[in-house]
Image: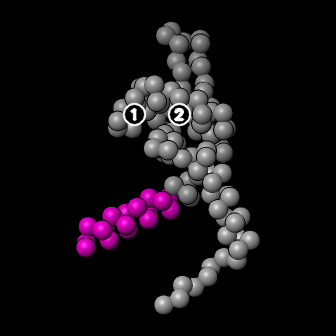
Amino acid sequence: MKQKIIYSEVQCTKHISAVEDALYVLGGKWKLRIIIALISGHNRFNELQRIIKGISARVLSNELKQLELNGLVERVVQADQIPVVIEYIATDYATTLKDVVGALADWGQKHKKKITAS
């Protein structure tokens, strides 16, 4: 059975390039999990580490720095409080990923059902 072609060669190349760019920023085990936690209102470092099972403090710190460099996270220091409070806030740019995350979650649930039904 011949597979139906969905994209032209040019479109295919553009899509591959765009996905490579997205995966460069969002790829890896932790980044999307961090963004989901931030969008869900978990803003402090220890809170993030508690909600994201298995992430070490060092890895969380590095991932937050990378997400900040890419404009997805803002680090807010409240130096007027004792002790100093540091929060991480998902930027408006990060919230543009909500539909992507939703689509991935939907697909993941369907895939899990399909695999466990087999």
Q: Position of residue 49 (x, y in %)?
A: 40, 31
For mark 1, give the secondary structure.
loop
For mark 2, give the secondary structure.
helix
Q: Position of residue 48 (x, y in %)?
A: 43, 32
Q: Position of residue 67 (x, y in %)?
A: 59, 36
Disc marking residue 55: 1
- Bin the neighbour count of mark 2 within 10 Å (Cα to Cα): few under 14, some 14-19, many 20 and up: some
Do the residues bearing badges 1 and 2 touch, measured as CB atoms within 8 Å?
A: yes
Q: Earlier in the sequence, mark 1 or mark 2?
A: 1
- The residue sitting at 44% across, 65% down in the picture is 107
- The residue sitting at 54% across, 21% down in the picture is 86
| Chain part drawn in magenta | 102-118
Disc marking residue 63: 2
Extreme residue toward the top, this view: 82
Secondary structure, magenta segment, majority class = helix
Extreme residue toward the right, this view: 10
Which of the 4 image quarters holds residue 108? bottom left
Is residue 70 shown in magenta? no
115 vs 39: above or below: below
Quadrant showing the C terminus = bottom left
